[in-house]
Each structure stands twice: as C-alpha cells, then as structure tokens.
Amino acid sequence: MCLGVPGRVLSREQEDGLLMGRVDFGGVSRKVCLEHVQDVVPGDYVLVHVGFALSRIDADEARKIFELLSELDQLGELQEPSTSLDVNPERQR
Amino acid sequence: MRRLEPSESRRLAEHWASQIAGSTTRPWKIMEVCGGQTQTIVKFGLDQLLPSQIELVHGPGCPVCVTPLEMIDRALAIAQVPDVIFCSFGDMLRVPGTQGDLLDLKARGADIRVLYSPLDALTIARQHPARRVVFFAIGFETTAPANAMAIYQAERRGLTNFSALCSHVLAPPAMRAILQDPEQRVQAFLGPGHVCSVMGLSEYEPIAAQFSVPIVVTGFEPLDLLEGICLAVQHLEAGRSGVDNQYARVVQHRGNSSSQALVARVFEVCDRKWRGIGLLPNSGLRIRDEYRVHDAVSVFELGELTAEEPGECISGHILRGLKKPTDCPAFGNRCTPESPLGATMVSSEGACAAYHAYGRRSEPLIRLARGAAGVSS
Amino acid sequence: MSAACPVPLGRYSHIVLGHGSGGRLSEELLEQVFLPALSSPVLARLEDQALLPFPREPGARLAFTTDSFVVSPLFFPGGDIGRLAVCGTVNDLCVGGAVAHSLSAAFVLEEGLLIDDLRRIVTSMAATCREAGVQIVAGDTKVVERGKADGVFITTSGVGVVPVGRSLSISNARVGDDLLVSGPIGDHGVSILSVREGFDFETTLLSDCAPLASLTQTMLEISPNIRCMRDPTRGGISGVLHDIARQSRVGIWIDEARVPVRDEVRAASDMLGLDPLYIACEGRLIAAIAPEDSDRVLSAVRAHPLGRGAALIGKVVGDQPGLVRMRSRVGGERIVPLLSGEQLPRIC
C-alpha cells in the first residue's frame, strides 16, 4: 500500500483556508496539500501520498545513505560491482 | 537529495546482502506487512540476495485485496446511478465484484473517473453542482488523512453533492490477528512505513512486547527493505523484541499529530470484514454521524449487501502468511490477473498478482540467480 | 445546384455537418485548410486517386502500412495528433527498412471542432512530412455529429520501398544479438498524462514524437546485420521486446541500469505507480543487432540528433524462449510480464 514519493517544496500558499504548495518530484511538479506539515518552507522535502504531504523528510537521516556510500568507498569493502550482463561475461563495457 | 546511481544502488545492496548473510546463523521467517513492500521485493528480486535461511512471508497490507466483496458491489451499484460521477484511485478499477468491475461499467457508459488525489474529487464536485460526486475512499491509515481532509473540506464548503464510500482498514489489528493465529510462525515484521509516518510507532510497542517479536518499521525502496531485513535478522539473532525504525527519515515516533487529529475528527474506529481473513474487531474506520451527509453509505441507501467468495480461493492463508501463491492449485491457471478468484490476485500488489506478474510460477525460478548475485548461502 | 447554403467558409469558426456533405462547404474546407498546408503536385491534381511510380529495381519491394490516431488531448507538449499521425505511419515503414515515400490521410472531424485547431493540425502534418521526406498524396474528410469523435480522428496509410537485399523481420533476432534503444523511454506517455484530467502535473517534458526516417537510414547504411527494428508505441518497450521474444522464439535479458529513463519520466512514474517499461514512446526504436556491429551502430545512433541517449540495454539469449527478463539495479532478477490491458495509476 501507500505509494509515497519524496518531493521538494517549491512554494507555499493559502488556498481556501488550506495550506497548499507546489512540490517538485524531479522535473515533474504538482500542487500538494501541506496542511499537516505547517512548518515546511521552500527547499524542504516532504513525503507525498495521493497529493497530500504526510511528513517532512529529515535531511540528516536522508543523508545517511550517502555517508554509508562514502564509508564503503573508503573502506574499499567491496569490489567494483559488475556492470556487464552476466549472460555474456566476456563483453565488458 | 539526489537519486542514487545504479552502481551506487548495487554497491549498497551488496553491502546489506553481505551484512545479512554475515548475521544469519539460523532460519528466520520475516513478514513484510505492506503490499507495496511485497511489490518491491518481487520487482527487484530482493529475496534472491538473501541467504536461503531467510524466508520472506507476505502480509495483508493490501487495502485493495482486503476490501470486502460487498463493498465492491456497493461501489458498482452507486456508480450506475445516473447522476453520479464516481471517482476512484486506479487500483480499484479492475477489482471484480460479484458481477463485473468498474472498468466494465465505464465501458457501458457510467461516469467513472480515475483520480490521483481525493482532493481532486472536491474540485469535480464544485464544477458539477447538479451531479452527485462519490469518492471511493479505500486505504490503510496512510490514506486516511487525505480522505478525511476531503470530507472535512466538503463539509466546510457546503459541498453537499460530495460523499465518500469509505472502506478503511487499520494495520495493528491485522498484525495482531496474524500473531494470534496458532498456525502462524512469523518471527519478525517489517512494519508499514507510510502507515507509521501518520500514526507513529506507539501502537506497535505493545504488540512487540505481548508477542515478543521485533518489528522494524521499514520504507519501500529496495535498499530500505534490505536494511530493514538486516535489522530484523540482527534483532532475531540477538533474541531482542521491540520496535525499531529503519525509515527514520520519514517516520517519527509520534507520527503526524495533525493528521491523527483530523482522522479522529472525521472517522471513528469500527469492526471491519477483511476479504480473505474475515471480521476483525476494531480494525476499520467509518465516517462519523456528524458527517453523515458526506457518507455514501447513507446517501445511497442500499441496505445490507451480501456476497459469496469462490470456494477455491486460499487468499486467507496467503494474507496471513501461512501459504504462498505457488501453493495454490488454481494459481496461474484458473486464477490469473485477468480472471481472479480472490483477494490476493485482484490487486497488482497482492501477493498472488505480484508473483504472477513477476514470473514466480514455481520455486526453481526464484532460486535462479543466487550464484550470479554472488550471495553465499 | 444543390440546396446547400452558399455561405463562405470564413463565416464558420467551427466544423459543421455541412463540411462533410461533399458540397460547397467541403470544397472550401479542402481549398482553404487542407490544400494550402499539404500542397503536393499529386494532391493538387484533385483526382480520386494518386498515381505513383512503381519501384523499378528488381528485387525491391513495396512496403505498405496503416494506422489510426485518436489521441486526446489533440495538442500536447511537444506535439499534436497531426504530427503523431505522420510519424506513426512513417516510422512503421522505416523500421521495416523501407524508404518512406507517400502517405494518405483520412480525417473524421467532430461537429464543433475549431477550424483554427484543424489548421494547426494540418500545418503540423505538413511540417512533419517535410522533416520525414514524404508527401501526403491522397486524403478524405468526413464529419460526424458532436460527441461521436474526440475532436478529430486521423487514419494515415503509407507506402515505401524496401531496397533489394534488405530483409528485416521481427522473427530474425538470433541468440547473441544486442538490443539497442535509441533514446530515453516513456517521454510521450508522460507528456500526455501531464495534460489529462485527474492527474495534472506540470513538467517541461515534451513528447518524443518524431519521424525516424533519417535515423533508420543511417543505421542501415552502417550495418547489414540489423535483424529487426520496431518503434515502441502502445505497450512501451516491453511490448516490442515481447514481440521479438515471441516471433523470433528467443529469450531476452535486459539490464535495468542501462535502460535510459529521464528524471521527469522516473518522477511521474514514481508518483503514479507506473512502470516506464510500459509507457509509450513515439520517436524511439528498438533494434536487434548482430554483436559484431552493435558498438558501431550505437556510436552512429548517438551521433544522430534523434539518437542522443541511445544505449545497448540487453541481449538475446537461447534459454526460456518467449520470456523477457530483467536484472534490477540492485542485482536481483525478475520476469518482465506482458501487460494485460492499460497500465492504471495506483496508490498502493
């Protein structure tokens, strides 16, 4: 259930007594109801489900995956992942 | 925030896979609650990256699958009323009732519109004051705030031509039902990430304590699920129970209190019948009396409807994690996405539909790439 | 003289039933809307049929195809129904190795269609024909009552010539062939969704609708070992890959990490719960190419204006014929199913 997608808040405005905003999902933007995330400002990220923002995304938490990536890079923990198709291992690109 | 490159996703996936393999010393059975999580697992072949001792079992978190047959029939009846504009999420269009589905009705001239958001149904209601606009409000707690907002705004703005047909279900009672079932052997849960973004974690703590299970609230991206599985395995290996939060970037302990308040204002908890499972007390939401004029059940007096399920269907067992789709003799032959017999085949994220779509006709195909993925068992 | 009212076209801003009745109004529509835009020597003769020269080269074959276009809305970011109608038929000819030559265009107009809109559509068709190096040599117009056609339906048929020695076929793919896609997938489908009721979202994404004549010519000049080409329209690239797998009786593997998808398409797909593999393109092709030529063809495609972002996305294999499988970006694998029916947006 629950297709929720992160998007970046571009603007916020009152509309008919409801806080609405324009949210960008990466080249595609839509009007989203921000009524339950009152403290967001443009530049913040929100989790959007059916045109409704459910929560503000915590930037520090979101960054952790990139921190993990650079740790892994530094540790050289893993070999370069294979980029060629397994079905024809001689063809490397 | 940016998207990960495919090579970065691959690197992180291999990291989690090796962490999981390194932590696993015994067989474990883990259930992911949400249908969306099931879809991700099957779509990305995540179980192929796990040691064979980890068994992933699919849960009942598919609101489309668990919508009772009578509710579908009610929707079909309302959609046929001449002045009605029937609005729905795309998911419900192909769910068959006792006689046909919404898509059939659309083909035969009913005004049925697929919408992305319940708030768009309010716009339609405003644009067509002489027509009655009905929104098919299904979902778990994740969708409840948006549906509640639509009803609340309709009330505020005097949109008396708008009503919602509500079939909301709640996640914790479903998890309790699974854990209380003497046949079940689920040892840990990947909790519903977006449900928890609304409701927070506090409902899950008593469940984890009562049944001594770890519940790791998890997101929906493939890497979220791998990390969630890793945490679950580590808790299981250490004999720890309790609630953990893998999805901390979205989920806070208290959830969203404004959403909770609005949901409580517009809806009240009620008993609900779950297709394939049966009646679960206090497991659903219904629209409160104060908003009765926006409750399609009152507006369109259809009375009690009853409907019979095909006898052959084992959805109940699948939704409770007791059986897999491949255990069903009708799977893939008498029961397919084009002609589903029951709950878990009707929705694209029901376990049977997901298995069928992604080719899980038989076990050998699942083990397909263990070697290629470089996972040691 | 008929009893038709001799009212000049200029009086009407919208199509009326009289425009389809074969009388003065029909003639005026032809002379004032269609001919000025689509002028070709053949069309200007206003015969009941177009006479075209027959290919002289022994072994050359005539290619012939037809397609109908019913897209709504008529105008979408990056294109319109007219452009689509020309591209669709031209592309069907070109991917079969033909040099596209001439088209016919039949219009079913809805009573009430703005004549200015019709002008825009026909002008767009003319420009697209010039781009593709083809001409419209025959046409027809009918008018139906309000409500019986979404503005306008267009059917185009096309002829072209396949030179001797060239035989591309959907059943020609062989084990070991590489699979090429000429650019990012799903642009057209998403641009249409962005202007459909019920979803509206804003994007700068344009439909990829384009005639592929010069791209296919370039590719076929580089290599005689292109087994088949097809343009993924309805059903997306999944549809074409399944066609190849089924007709050539081979298996197919694709690598998710290599399939080019624009950020906007990914964003819209995530938001609506759609899979880009099934979203329509209108200016892309998939080709199965012998492995010894695939790198050269890829370079040539990438150097072509319609081939930026081209990639080799997969391989033809011998096991599990008929099946299309994908290696996901995190390493796990799955089958790519053939979609039954339309892909619907979902919330779950």
Image: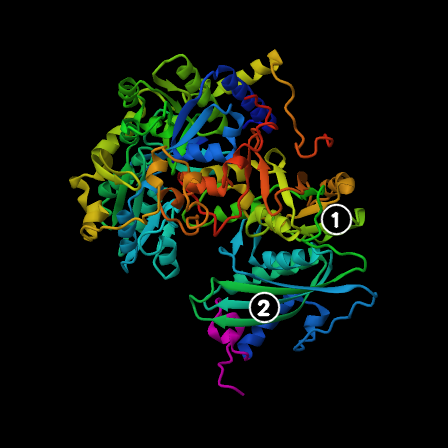
Residues under numbered marks 1 and 2 in contact, where contact means CB atoms less than 8 Å apart: no
Residue lying furthest left: B289
Q: Does the magenta run of residues contain C17? A: yes
On the picture, is C239 further left or further right than C271? right
Q: Earlier in the sequence, mark 1 or mark 2?
A: 2
Residue in view at x 61 percent, y 47 percent: C241
> Residue B116 lies in what quarter of the image?
top left
Neighbourhood count class around disc 1 (C-alpha, 10 Å): few under 14, some 14–19, many 20 upward: many
Residue in view at x 66 percent, y 55 percent: C91
**Where residue C106 is drawn, which disc sits there?**
2
Q: Position of residue C68 (x, y in %)?
A: 56, 62
Disc 2 residue type (three-letter): Ala
Is residue B1 something that shows in the picture? no
Chain under callout 2: C
Chain part drawn in magenta: C1-23
- Above/below status of C271 relative to B239: below
Disc 1 residue type (three-letter): Ile
On the picture, is C8 further left or further right than C226? left
Q: Position of residue B295 (x, y in %)?
A: 22, 45
Please identify the dominant SS of the magenta region: loop
Is residue A76 something that shows in the picture? yes
Disc 1 target residue: C226
- Above/below status of B144 relative to C220: above
Coloring applied to the structure: rainbow
Chain under callout 1: C
